[in-house]
Image (cartoon, helix red, strand yellow):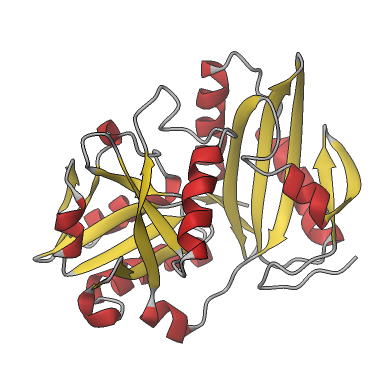
Amino acid sequence: MQTTQGGCQLKELVIYLDSKGMIATKTYVQYLSPGEVEGKGMFETMRIVDGNFFCLDEHIARMKRGLELLNIRMPFNKKDLQSRIKALMKRNQLADARVRFSAWKEDGAVHNSVVCYPSIKYSNSKVKKGFSAMVSPVVRNKTRLSHVKSIQYGLFKKALLDARSKGFDEAILLNKEKNVVEGAYTNIFYVKNKALFTPSIGCGCLNGITRNVVIECARRANIKCVMIQEGVKKFLKADEVFITNSAIGVMPLTKINDSIISGGCAGEITLSLRELYNSLQFKGSAMQK
């Protein structure tokens, strides 16, 4: 078995499938990922930082809500999930990790999996430079599952692969009203005149755990946060733009299509929110041991 701490290079991992430990190849782990596995179900991705399960309760609650919409029983309880994650981190020799736990129904049977990956760690220079994104032609309309994480991920995968084939890090999805909804795998924010703006849940975006933590960070920092339904022009004219998810935390977005944002480097408010968010992870706030 070979893993690389701080990156994604691996040959095999020990995982849990249907509550049983097994050694899985990289190809098999990929098969279990959203957009690949068949059936209907939900998944969650979260971070383990310094032994802390960041926002575990929130991730479990969101998965449970999603599974209820599909009439699928929740296969995990908190204690069992923590135990499996700790065992996988030990077996895979991981200090920090990204965790994906999934539950789905295929051919009448309910399945579950837990996979722990090495964390992705970005250098200070990469964070300062930020990510780039293109506006995708893929339309993201609101459905009853928009606010949860469905394994039916083909729409997002198509948009992301298209963006990356053109040299971008992320794809920005619009709805039929031409309003910005979210990234292919992130929520999105912009800063204008020291206020924070992000698409409302009514646009059809994921009710992101990291999104909600960042909104709380902004509140603590006395930064006004407004929920919006606006087109991409507002983002192109913003002082700063950033994206969020559990794996990358808060990441500056400094280029959209051909437009450079905030001079091509991370903005002050973005970096302050990133620091606040990271401090919550390392201090254990909103976490469970």
Residue at 68% x, 27% y: name it.
Answer: 104
Counting from the top left corner in percent of width and height, residue 163 is at: 45, 59
Counting from the top left corner in percent of width and height, residue 54 is at: 54, 53
Counting from the top left corner in percent of width and height, residue 60 is at: 57, 35
Would you place residue 225 above or below residue 257 in this image?
Answer: above
Would you place residue 273 above or below residue 138 in this image?
Answer: below
Q: Nearer the viewer, residue 7 or 158?
A: 158
Residue at 67% x, 36% y: name it.
Answer: 102
Residue at 52% x, 31% y: name it.
Answer: 61
Counting from the top left corner in percent of width and height, residue 142 is at: 34, 29
Q: Where on the picture, by quarter, is residue 1?
A: bottom right
Residue closest to the far left: 193
Residue closest to the far bottom: 125
Q: Where on the picture, by quarter, is residue 261?
A: bottom left
Q: Is residue 246 visible?
A: no
* 72 relative position to 273: left or right: right
Q: Nearer the viewer, residue 55 or 170?
A: 170
Residue at 89% x, 43% y: name it.
Answer: 21
Q: Is residue 285 visible?
A: yes
Number of disc labels: 0
* 248 relative position to 174: left or right: right
